[in-house]
Image (tube, rainbow, N blue to C red):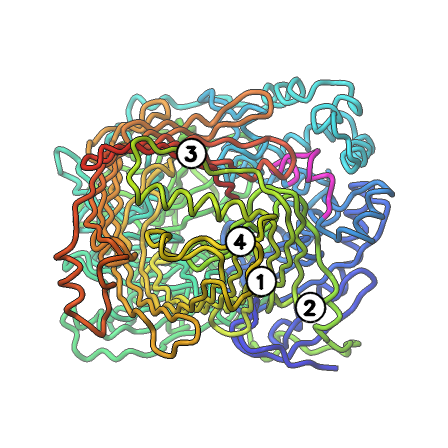
């Protein structure tokens, strides 16, 4: 039985027919492209679920909906309990970070089943509350008892026999070693979910998983199940530390320290006295994908999100920005050294619909070529006729296919006018075999890294398919090496003899020993003129911080030395590196034979049930004490702590429509403003704001629909108080965005409308003419108006370095506002406004010192007719003192503190006496400027963050801001304090 899914559902980018397979514990929803995955999961899902139940001693059953979508090039599996248990799978070929899994999809699926089961452990009483009242999202184990990062760690380490690769691969464990060596290993407080700067997304899950593995090894899996059962109860005064002590009889902090103490360190380490810094130490940089080109050394800086270049013989070693980028997955260089090949991930219509893209950058002309390719791990190879072609792994259909396209634009830049853009090579691989890091060798020959079930091979092949293919592995002392980052090195740069260029070839690779502890090391594979390997050398000992992403130039290896929270770009002469031979073992090539997609899967006879979204309408979840305060066009949905409840649901598992109802009476005040020597205008604005805040009884409804390429929002809020003062507003919003260039560059379009009926007039300067109403006036007697907004904005602002206090980029936007009075057809105002913002990460070229930001990051912002009452407003703001505290005491964690100073200047006008600017009357803009007066001020802002380290609340930040402002013309002083809750 089939059901046609809505167009552009939240988890699919185009309309598809949806099928359902039901097992004992799962409903698996999928389309025809994912039938093979759905059948595979249906055969194993129940077994994996029961395995997770045994691990976490879960004593009740529940159903989970699994949604499979083909519309992302990134393999991802994600569980959520809100509004009900659901796992969303984007079925794609795994990237190299999932290559350590024996089966990427199944291992990730089991990981999310483990997350669902572990977080759903409840006592019988709490389970009754969840089933009958609060829904699947009521999970005491994560609500209060176990910090968020430890929930993640428990899933990874949930079974001592788990196939989870996180703890089986020394590529991951070396981060723990580096942290211990540098004395930066996070404390129990820091790791409990509040540490929010690099390398937070890796360190928290790896460290907590390793800790729970240590706990299970020391006390046993049965004891761990008992501990998890206790965590599923509401132990208000015990929380995580008390529960741990009750079960294990040891303080959690002592067990954490014991775990740190047993982390092994490398037995020997090559001291780096013979290596040198290529660039000065930069605590805001993390170097990836280093390549040697004709124009200098090029790399991707992961923390600054940019691709840079530095000339080899530049005495000052200055780095130059080539272009901004993020989500870069690989950089390679053409055989001629002129063209840079960038592989990156780009968001689609929605960010989660990720696409692999390969672009070509001309280092000589410093510009991108117009052609781009839908593939990953791109490289430029040489065809038999000498023409250049772009090779990569095409995963658009959910399988790996090595494809090569001749590029006309590329060849014409090299003077080859007879080139034609065309597909010249394609080769599909069987499911479970993935090519990585395609590398050009001689004409018609290339190399590639192959991964099959966490076994790593090197493939040597030719484009014409008329030569012998070779597949081999590398081994050191009987240990087969797990190779990463295969790349090309000019043999002449290795030997130091220019005459060797073209006579022999060299490949570089990275590896980490698995049978003993080591940092990242470098290896060299030497090939003869026929591209046959004849020798492999590998680094025999460790360099401190490892040797990642190395590139050769003039017999020097330029590499990234990875520290705990940054990296250094260093170099060392090849003669100063202790080397040893590695063995080459050729293997049977049959498993890489050319593969036909038509034979990849034969549809099985399967019992499908009817997919109907209506059965999920009644499923939802309740949340208490964080109700909706307001929903406006300017601020969107605003949630504040208060006495209230929120109910959320979805129309169906494909995330088409979110539905929210909120009711509240009374909010905790998060905003305080005090005026000294206040002007009449400021007093009126403050009075109107207090009246609005006094309307503390609210009822809100919101629908968000994603069944089209745009997000459509319908919302309504009714606010009132005992005095009979109220505000009712209803709004609609349509928003869609388009990616531009790299991922964080997006063009956003908004079309919105709002109706407001209030006892308070919207223009606070006209309160004498339109006084505040009370005692429940009828809607027809209230102040009513309509507003329509069309807006477009662009931004590439992003974090620049380790700290969120430093940013780089620009943003700009414009909007057209139209306002109608109730009952009028013609709007009383149509206005256009502009704004622009620039973020500058430094005014002084100073490095961070022990978490203190010394570079004076700055912000410049300007608006033109953006809000009524101000013709022009601009400010310049500088961070005078910023510090990444990243520590705290008891259960209070302080991420950072910042002190800003700035100057604000505005040309204001009286909206009660001056005609409002209107596009239909250009002369009014001149009139506005003719009646403007200057209002400028100096201000300082103290921002301070706080996170409660209690269960899931460790994900939230209480960001407080204290602003003191002195107005130079009116001699007015303004003191404002507010708190925002962010996730």
Residue neighbourhood size for the residue with mark 3, other residues' Cα within 10 Å, grouped as few (<14), some (14–19), many (≥20):
some
Q: In terms of secondary structure, where does tag 2 sit? A: helix
Q: Earlier in the sequence, mark 2 or mark 1?
A: 2
Q: In terms of secondary structure, where does tag 3 sit? A: strand
Q: Earlier in the sequence, mark 3 or mark 4?
A: 4
Q: In terms of secondary structure, where does tag 1 sit? A: strand
Q: Which residue does the numbered mark 3 point to in the structure image? A: 977
3 vs 1, front mark = 3
3 vs 2, front mark = 3
Q: Are marks 3 and 4 in contact (CB under 8 Å)?
A: no
Q: Earlier in the sequence, mark 3 or mark 2?
A: 2
Where is residue 510? Give x, y as percent.
42, 42
Q: Residue at x 54, y 58 (%)?
A: 94
Numbered range of the magenta stretch: 138-151
- Quarter of the image holding residue 535? top left
Where is residue 57? Give x, y as percent.
82, 41
Q: Which residue does the numbered mark 4 point to in the structure image? A: 774
- Horizontally, residue 931 falls left or right of residue 529, namely left
Q: Which residue does the numbered mark 1 point to in the structure image? A: 702
Q: Earlier in the sequence, mark 1 or mark 4?
A: 1
Instruction: Kindly identify which numbered label has been placed on residue 38.
Output: 2
4 vs 2, front mark = 4
Q: In terms of secondary structure, where does tag 4 sit? A: loop
- Quarter of the image holding residue 776? bottom right
Q: CA distance from mark 3 to mark 1?
A: 29 Å
Q: Residue at x 18, y 37 (%)?
A: 969
Q: CA distance from mark 1 to mark 4?
A: 27 Å
Q: CA distance from mark 3 to mark 2?
A: 53 Å
Judge whether residue 888 can be spotted in this image. yes
2 vs 1, front mark = 1
Q: Quadrant of the N terminus?
A: bottom right
């Amino acid at each position: 039985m089939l059901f046609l899914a809505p167009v552009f559902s939240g988890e699919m980018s185009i309309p598809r027919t949806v099928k359902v397979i039901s097992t004992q514990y799962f409903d698996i929803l999928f389309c025809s492209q994912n039938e093979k995955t759905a059948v595979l999961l249906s055969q194993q899902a129940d077994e994996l679920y029961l395995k997770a139940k045994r691990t976490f001693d879960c004593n009740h059953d529940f159903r989970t909906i699994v949604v499979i979508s083909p519309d992302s090039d990134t393999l991802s599996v994600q569980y959520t309990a809100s509004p009900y248990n659901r796992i969303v799978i984007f079925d794609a070929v795994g990237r190299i970070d999932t290559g350590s899994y024996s089966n990427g999809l199944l291992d990730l699926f089991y990981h999310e089943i483990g997350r669902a089961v572990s977080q759903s452990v409840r006592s019988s009483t709490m389970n009754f509350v969840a089933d009958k009242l609060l829904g699947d999202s009521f999970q005491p184990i994560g609500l209060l008892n176990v910090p968020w990062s430890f929930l993640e760690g428990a899933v990874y380490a949930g079974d001592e026999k788990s196939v989870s690769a996180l703890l089986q691969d020394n590529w991951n464990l070396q981060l723990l070693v580096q942290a211990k060596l540098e004395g930066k290993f996070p404390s129990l407080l820091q790791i409990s979910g509040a540490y929010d700067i690099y390398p937070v997304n890796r360190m928290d899950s790896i460290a907590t998983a390793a800790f729970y593995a240590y706990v299970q090894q020391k006390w046993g899996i049965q004891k761990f199940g008992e501990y998890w059962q206790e965590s599923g109860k509401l132990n208000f005064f015990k929380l995580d530390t008390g529960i741990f002590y009750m079960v294990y009889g040891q303080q959690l902090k002592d067990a954490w320290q014991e775990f740190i103490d047993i982390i092994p360190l490398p037995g020997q380490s090559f001291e780096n006295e013979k290596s040198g810094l290529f660039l000065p130490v930069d605590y805001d940089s993390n170097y990836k994908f280093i390549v040697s080109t004709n124009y200098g050394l090029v790399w991707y800086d992961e923390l600054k999100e940019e691709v840079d270049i530095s000339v080899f013989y530049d005495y000052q070693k200055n780095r130059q920005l080539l272009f901004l980028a993020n989500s870069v997955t690989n950089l390679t260089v053409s055989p001629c050294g002129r063209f840079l090949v960038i592989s990156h991930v780009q968001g689609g219509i929605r960010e989660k619909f990720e696409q692999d893209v390969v672009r070509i950058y001309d280092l000589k002309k410093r510009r991108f070529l117009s052609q781009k390719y839908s593939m990953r791990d791109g490289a430029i190879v040489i065809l038999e006729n000498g023409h250049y072609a772009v090779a990569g792994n095409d995963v658009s259909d959910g399988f790996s296919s090595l494809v090569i396209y001749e590029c006309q634009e590329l060849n014409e830049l090299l003077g080859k006018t007879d080139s034609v853009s065309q597909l010249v090579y394609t080769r599909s691989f069987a499911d479970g075999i993935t090519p990585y890091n395609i590398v050009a060798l001689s004409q018609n020959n290339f190399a590639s890294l192959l991964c099959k079930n966490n076994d790593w091979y090197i493939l040597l092949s030719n484009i014409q398919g008329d030569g012998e293919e070779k597949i081999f592995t590398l081994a050191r002392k009987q240990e087969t090496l797990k190779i990463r980052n295969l790349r090309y090195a000019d043999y002449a740069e290795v030997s130091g003899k220019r005459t060797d260029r073209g006579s022999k070839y060299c490949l570089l690779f990275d590896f980490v020993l698995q049978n003993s502890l080591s940092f990242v090391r470098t290896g060299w594979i030497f090939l003869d003129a026929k591209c046959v390997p004849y020798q492999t050398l590998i680094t025999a000992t460790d360099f401190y911080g490892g040797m990642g992403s190395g590139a050769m130039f003039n017999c020097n290896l330029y590499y990234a030395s990875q520290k705990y929270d940054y990296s250094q770009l260093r170099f060392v002469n090849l003669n100063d590196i202790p080397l040893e031979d590695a063995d080459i073992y050729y293997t049977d090539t049959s498993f890489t034979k050319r593969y036909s997609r038509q034979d990849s899967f034969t549809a099985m006879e399967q019992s499908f049930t009817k997919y109907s979204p209506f059965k999920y309408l009644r499923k939802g979840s309740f949340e208490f004490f964080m109700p909706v305060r307001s929903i406006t066009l300017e601020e969107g949905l605003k949630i504040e702590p208060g006495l209230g409840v929120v109910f959320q649901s979805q129309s169906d598992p494909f995330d088409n429509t979110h539905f929210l109802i909120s009711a509240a009476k009374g909010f905790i005040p998060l905003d305080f403003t005090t005026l000294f020597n206040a002007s009449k205008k400021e007093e009126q604005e403050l009075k109107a704001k207090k009246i609005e805040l006094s309307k503390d009884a609210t009822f809100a409804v919101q629908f968000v629909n994603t069944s089209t390429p745009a997000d459509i929002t319908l919302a309504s809020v009714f606010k009132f108080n005992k005095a009979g003062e109220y505000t009712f507003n209803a709004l609609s919003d349509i928003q869609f965005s388009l990616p531009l260039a790299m991922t964080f560059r997006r063009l956003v379009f908004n079309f919105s409308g709002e109706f407001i009926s209030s006892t308070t007039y919207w223009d606070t300067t006209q309160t004498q003419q339109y006084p505040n109403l009370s005692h429940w006036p009828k809607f027809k007697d209230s102040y009513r108006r309509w507003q329509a907004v069309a807006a477009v904005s662009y931004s590439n602002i992003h974090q620049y370095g380790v700290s969120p206090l430093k940013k780089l980029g620009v943003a700009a936007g414009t909007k057209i506002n139209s306002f109608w009075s109730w009952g009028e057809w013609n709007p009383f105002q149509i206005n256009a406004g502009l704004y622009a913002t620039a973020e500058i990460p430094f005014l002084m070229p100073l490095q961070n010192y022990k978490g203190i930001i010394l570079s004076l990051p700055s912000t410049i912002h300007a608006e033109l007719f953006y809000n009524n009452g101000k013709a022009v407003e601009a400010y310049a703001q500088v961070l005078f003192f910023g510090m990444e505290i990243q520590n705290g005491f008891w259960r209070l964690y302080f991420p950072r503190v910042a002190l800003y100073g700035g100057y604000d200047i505005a040309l204001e006008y009286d909206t009660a006496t001056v005609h409002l600017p209107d596009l239909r009357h250009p002369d009014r803009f001149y009139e506005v400027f003719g009646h403007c007066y200057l209002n400028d001020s100096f201000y300082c802002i103290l921002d301070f963050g706080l996170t409660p380290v209690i269960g899931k609340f460790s994900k939230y930040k209480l960001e407080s801001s204290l602003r003191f402002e002195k107005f130079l013309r009116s001699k007015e002083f303004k003191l404002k304090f507010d708190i925002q809750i962010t996730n």
